[in-house]
Image (spheres, grey):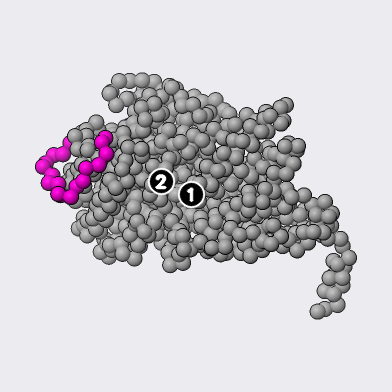
């Protein structure tokens, strides 16, 4: 050891432990404030920032563990320990949002669970308003992590705690307005009411237990598939009047985000993941942020940028950045779910005209529930579409005229600043795009096909008019958008279309239906792969398990809505894709009518569909629940 190092060690040992600790805290705070507001979508640029700030928090966490007793004697409070752990959890969640690596999300859960178990923020929270707010923000952040990780039991536990804490705070701090936190509770309750256990019978994520392994997917002949593309990135965004959301995650974007991830097997979780250290805090071994919980033989999750009501300029900036980072074999998925235009004549399923007023007032939002500092207020601006009470102004089945030619992603008073036009996407077709439009204005996006600047785009377009699903008193988006449900949970979508809820279904019937649908989807995938006239646009993405699954579920959705009695021969209720798919997967072919009639038979709903020819039924089709 050099003389200088010896002098530095001696000097450091002379500084009181508490002073060294607070110096580390101050250093960590400064680095955290620099990374807190960095955009999620510029991933590669900010990797070094993350590791630097994480290194400081690792040092801080280890130091407080090794010197806990001295620091407590010097006045260290339990909530201050909890705040460090909460910051580390925020860092992990933020890095998950940038990379989509499941290990980061799991680590965030581990830290937040330890905070909850050790009750770091509980002591004195009803005497200190600021400490009560810290506990509320912690619960909101932990809720978000549990939602994305699909830990539903913990979600319900946290919701109950959040409700009780808000009520207790209202009684204790009578002069303080907790309206914002009441809205947070209403948001999550409404979200869970829409995203029921029925919608999650089968994981939305890609599960090797239920979905085919990538290695066994049928290959497309080389002359047809000139390239084999892989989904590397996705941009997910939605905006609808009165849509269900929690924080900045809407029901539609949540389901799409889930559907673009691998379902980790339980064997890949660390058995000691939730254990605490001997000193009552998390063990230092949990700081290993590179620990992977997923099957190492599987490809990584595609990276996802979830944009909450983006302005056009922000949306374009994100697209440009992601396209710049897209690898040569990569394809970018763009998912947009929004109403078309702001005013105009609307069309109901019966053909009668109604007018829909899309004007919205502005209320509060809670953007800081993601990675914003604990030291800031939890208020920012959003629309009353987050209110728990659906608007009565929009009738079931209403669809706005698409002649305005755009998607509206904000208040109509902002003009074109919140509108996304087909022409806005065309410059980015220099790279391969897989575009999903969920809108009553979806048809105008056909203009992209043929206008590309280098790579032909693949488009899945929702019906211009969406058939109402869910309960009779449900607003249009209280259960999510119809095509999106078909793409993420196809059998549940089929049941909802028939008016069947989870309480109406016998599990044996459901499992049989799931088996029939999975078999049909696999058969259709083989039909596409072996087709002589499959367009190269589709051929080059069939080898990607996520995009292949979306395409096959779209084909199922198209077949169901084409044959459904109430939408039969009504083109405005049928989804479309561009370029066209082979006639072999046309909804009116015998194979597709057979698949639909078999499912309908299970649910006693054959009379709800129109079949153009006699379809023989296998003898083992069992009776199921009544529609």
Give the residue at x 59% y 49%: 39
Can residue 242 be seen?
yes
Assess disc 1: are there few (<14), some (14-19) or many (≥20) residues with their C-alpha within 10 Å of its C-alpha: some
Magenta segment: does it hold 616? yes
The magenta stretch is 609-627
Instruction: Examine the structure image and report whether residue 111 is included in the region drawn in magenta.
Output: no
* Residue pictured at 43% horizontal, 56% vertical: 263
Q: Residues within 10 Å of mark 2 (few under 14, many from 20)?
A: few
Could you tell me if the residues under marks 2 and 1 are in contact, i.e. CB atoms within 8 Å? yes
Residue, disc 2:
200
Which residue is found at the position 63% from the left and 53% from the top? 114
Q: Quadrant of residue 494?
A: top left
Locate the N terminus and report the quarter of the image it occupies. Answer: bottom right
**In the rendering, which numbered label is found on residue 150?**
1
Secondary structure, mark 1, is loop
* Residue extending farthest bottom: 1
């Amino acid at each position: 050891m050099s003389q200088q190092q010896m002098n530095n060690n001696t000097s450091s040992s002379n500084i009181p432990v508490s002073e060294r600790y607070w110096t580390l805290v101050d250093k960590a705070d400064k680095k955290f404030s620099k990374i807190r507001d960095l955009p999620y979508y510029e991933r590669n640029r900010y990797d070094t920032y993350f590791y630097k700030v994480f290194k400081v928090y690792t040092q801080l966490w280890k130091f407080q563990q090794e010197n806990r007793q001295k620091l407590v004697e010097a006045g260290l409070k339990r909530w201050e320990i909890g705040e460090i752990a909460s910051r580390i959890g925020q860092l992990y969640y933020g890095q998950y949002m940038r990379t989509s690596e499941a290990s980061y999300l799991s680590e965030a859960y581990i830290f937040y669970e330890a905070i909850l178990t050790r009750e770091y923020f509980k002591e004195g929270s009803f005497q200190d308003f600021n400490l009560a707010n810290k506990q509320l923000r912690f619960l909101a952040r932990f809720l978000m992590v549990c939602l994305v990780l699909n830990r539903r039991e913990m979600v319900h536990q946290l919701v109950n705690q959040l409700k009780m804490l808000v009520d207790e705070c209202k009684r204790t701090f009578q002069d303080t307005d907790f309206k914002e936190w009441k809205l947070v509770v209403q948001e999550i309750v409404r979200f869970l009411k829409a995203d029921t256990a029925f919608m999650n019978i089968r994981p939305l994520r890609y599960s090797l237990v239920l979905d085919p392994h990538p290695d066994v997917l049928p290959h497309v002949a080389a002359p047809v598939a000139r390239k084999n593309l892989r989904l590397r990135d996705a941009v997910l965004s939605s905006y609808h009047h009165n849509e269900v959301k929690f924080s900045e995650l809407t029901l539609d974007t949540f389901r799409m985000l889930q559907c673009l991830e691998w379902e980790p097997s339980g064997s890949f979780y660390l058995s000691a993941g939730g254990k605490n250290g001997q000193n009552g805090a998390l063990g230092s071994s949990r700081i290993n942020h590179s620990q992977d919980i997923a099957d190492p033989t599987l490809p990584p999750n595609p990276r996802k940028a979830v944009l909450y009501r983006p302005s056009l300029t922000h949306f374009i900036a994100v697209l440009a950045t992601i396209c710049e980072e897209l690898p040569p074999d990569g394809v970018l998925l763009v998912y947009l779910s929004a109403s078309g235009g702001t005013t105009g004549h609307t069309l109901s399923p019966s053909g009668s005209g109604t007018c829909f007023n899309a004007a919205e007032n502005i209320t509060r939002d809670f953007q800081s529930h993601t990675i914003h500092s604990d030291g800031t207020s939890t208020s920012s601006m959003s629309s009353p579409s987050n209110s728990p009470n659906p608007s009565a102004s929009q009738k079931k089945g209403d669809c706005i005229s698409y002649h305005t030619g755009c998607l509206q992603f904000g208040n109509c008073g902002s003009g074109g600043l919140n509108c996304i036009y087909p022409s806005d996407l065309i410059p980015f077709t220099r790279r391969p795009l897989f575009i999903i439009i969920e809108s009553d204005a979806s048809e105008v996006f056909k203009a992209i096909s043929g206008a590309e600047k280098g790579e032909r785009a693949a488009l899945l377009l929702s019906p211009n008019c969406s058939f109402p699903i869910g309960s009779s008193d449900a607003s249009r988006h209280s259960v999510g958008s119809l095509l999106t449900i078909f793409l993420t949970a196809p059998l549940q979508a089929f049941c909802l279309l028939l008016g069947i809820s989870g309480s109406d279904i016998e599990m044996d019937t459901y499992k049989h239906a799931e088996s029939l649908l999975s078999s049909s989807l696999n058969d259709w995938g083989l039909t596409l792969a072996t087709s002589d006239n499959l367009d190269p646009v589709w051929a080059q993405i069939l080898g990607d398990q996520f995009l292949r699954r979306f395409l096959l579920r779209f084909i199922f959705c198209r077949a169901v809505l084409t044959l459904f009695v109430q939408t039969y021969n009504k083109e405005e209720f049928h989804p479309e894709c561009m370029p066209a798919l082979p006639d072999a997967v046309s909804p009116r072919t015998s194979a597709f009518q057979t698949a639909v009639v078999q499912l309908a038979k299970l649910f006693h709903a054959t009379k709800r569909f129109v079949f153009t020819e006699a379809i023989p039924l296998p003898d083992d089709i069992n009776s199921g629940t009544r529609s």
